[in-house]
Image (cartoon, grey):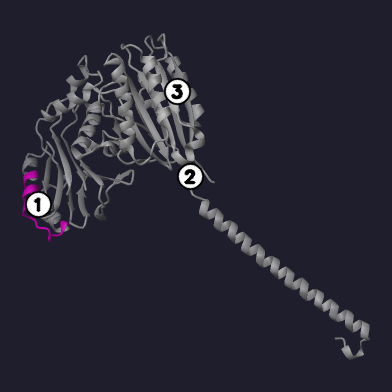
Amino acid sequence: MHDLSLMTESARIWFFIGLGVIGVAYLLSLYFVLMYILKVGRIRKATSKNNIHVLYCDAAYFKGKGKRKNQEDSLYISPISEAAHNGIIFAVSDGMGGLSDGQVISRYVTERLAEEYPYSFEDTESNAAVIRKISDEVYEKYRLGGGATLAMIHIYANAMNFYSLGDSNIILVRKGTATVLNPKQNYISFLVKKYASAGDNTHEAYINKSSKGLMDFVGNLNSKPIRTRSPIRLMEDDVIIICSDGVTDAIPVVTVPRYTDGAATAIAEKLKLRIRSAKRKRQDNYTAIVIKMDSSIF
Amino acid sequence: MIDRACFKHKGNAEHYCDEVFLSESPCFVAAVFCGKEEYINSLSCSFVLSEILKDSSAEDKLEDICLSLEEKIPEDVEYLILRIDQSLMVDSFKRGQVRAFIVNNGEMMILPNGIYGLKEGDMLLLAVRNFYSNLTNEGMLSDALISSDCNEWMDYLVRRVSDKTELLCGNLSAVCIRV
C-alpha cells in the first residue's frame, strides 16, 4: 500500500486522476452493457410478436385449348398490390360447350369480375349478388342461348371464401387428400335427392343421359351462386386448384395429390404435362389456377 | 332454437337396422344407433335405446342413461348419444365407430367425449361409419359452410356419399344439427 502522505503533490494528483478515469470507464461500460441487454430484449420481444406464421399464396396458372378450336376458358386474378388490404381473388370461367359465344361469355364474366373488384371478404351475400347481376346481364343478351360456369375464391388472412355457379371445380388438397369443395349444380343432385328420399339406390341418377346437364350457370336468370357463409380456415401446405372440367376429365380428382409436391409453378407444370400426356381424343379446353399456402415470417 | 335434419337409408342391406332418435324436450337429445344384420334383436336394441331416452329427464346424467343402456344391449353394438342443454353445453357419449363432428371457426374436428361448450352457429354432424367414411373432413366442412340450413347440408352430404357409393354401402344414418 502507498502511504498518500509520503507521495509528492503531483503524484497524488495523478493518482486521483487515474482513479477518476477508472471510475468513469467502469460506469460507461456498465451503461453500455445495460443498454445492450435492453436493446436485445426489445429485439427479441419484437421478433416474438411478429413471429406468427402468416400464410402467403404461391400461385401459378396454366391453360390449353385441348382438341377444341377455341379457348373458351377465361381466368381472373386480382391485383397483387391490393392483396394486403382486400385479399386476393382467383377465378376461372368456362364457356359452356354447345352453346354459342362461350369464349366471349367467359371473358365477359372475368372482365366484369375485375370491374367489380374489390370485394368485401365478410359480406359474401353481396359478392354473390354481384355474380347474380353478371349472370342476369349475360341472360339479357343471350336468353339461355349461351352461358358459362364460374369458380371463384377469395383468400384473406389465412381464410378462404368461395363462390360457384355450374360445374367448374375448387379442389382443396390437404394432407394428401383431394376434395372438391363446391357441389356441382347439375341434374344429378336433383335425381340423387329424389332416389334417396324414396329409399332407393342412386345408380339411375348417374346413367341418366341428361344428368350432367347444368341446372344453374352464369347466363341463367336470377341464378343462385353457391357461396360460403363463413370462411374456411386455411393451413400451411394446403393446395387449392380452381379449374375447368377439362382438367378433372383428364385427371381424376383422387389422383391430384400425386402432383402437388413442390411450389405452385411445379404443381402447375406437372398437371399440365399429365393432361397433355393423356392424349385424350376429345380433350376439352383446360384451365387451372394453382395456389399453395406457404408460411413466411414478416 | 336448434335446427336439425336426419337421414336414414337402408343402403344395400336387407333391413334398416340403425336407429336415429331426436327429442327437443326437456333438452335437445340426438342419438344414432348402429344396428347390425347379424343381431336378430338389433331392431329391438334400437327400440330399447329409444325407450330409455324417452323416459330420461334433463336431470339424469348421460353417463347413468348409458349405463342402463349397456345392461340391455349386446357389448359390440355401437351408438352415440348427444345432449345439448339451455346453456349450450353439449354432453356426449359414444361406443364404437359412431362419430360426432363439429364445425367451428372454419374448421372441422371430431367432438370429444364428455362435456363441451358450444356457441351459436356451431354445427354438428352425427353419423355412422358407413356414412362418414365416404366423406372427407374438408367436404363435410365446406358443405356446412355453404348451407343455409341443416336440410341443405344433409342434401350436399348425401350427394357426396352417393357420388362414391350410389348409396349401396349398408345402412346409412346421420343427423345434422345447427345451434
Give the letter of the chain under mark 3.
A
- Name the residue tied to disc 2: A54
The Cα–Cα distance between marks 2 and 1, rounded to whole angstroms, is 48 Å
Can you tell which of label 3 and label 1 is closer to the viewer?
3
Q: Is A93 left, or right, of B32 in this rendering? A: right
- Per the rendering, the mark at residue B53 is 1
Q: How crowded is mark 3: few (under 14 residues within 10 Å), some or many (20 or more)?
A: many
What residue do we see at 28% from left, 26% from top?
A184
Q: Where is residue A263 in the image (x, y as percent from the top left)?
A: 51, 31
- Name the residue tied to disc 3: A271
Element carrying mark 1 = helix
The reply to whether the magenta stretch includes residue A269 is no
Q: Can residue A3 be seen in this view?
A: no
- Per the rendering, the mark at residue A135 is none
Q: Please, what is the three-letter code of the amino acid marked with disc 3?
A: Leu
Q: Where is residue B79 in the image (x, y as percent from the top left)?
A: 17, 46
The Cα–Cα distance between marks 3 and 2, rounded to whole angstroms, is 27 Å
Can you tell which of label 3 and label 2 is closer to the viewer?
2
Q: Please, what is the three-letter code of the amino acid marked with disc 2?
A: Val
Q: Where is residue A64 in the image (x, y as percent from the top left)?
A: 45, 16
The Cα–Cα distance between marks 3 and 1, rounded to whole angstroms, is 53 Å
Earlier-in-chain disc, 3 versus 2: 2
What residue do we see at 53% from left, 46% from top?
A297
Q: Please, what is the three-letter code of the amino acid marked with disc 1?
A: Leu
- Between B126 and B122, the residue placed more toward the observer is B122
- Between A187 and A140, the residue placed more toward the observer is A140
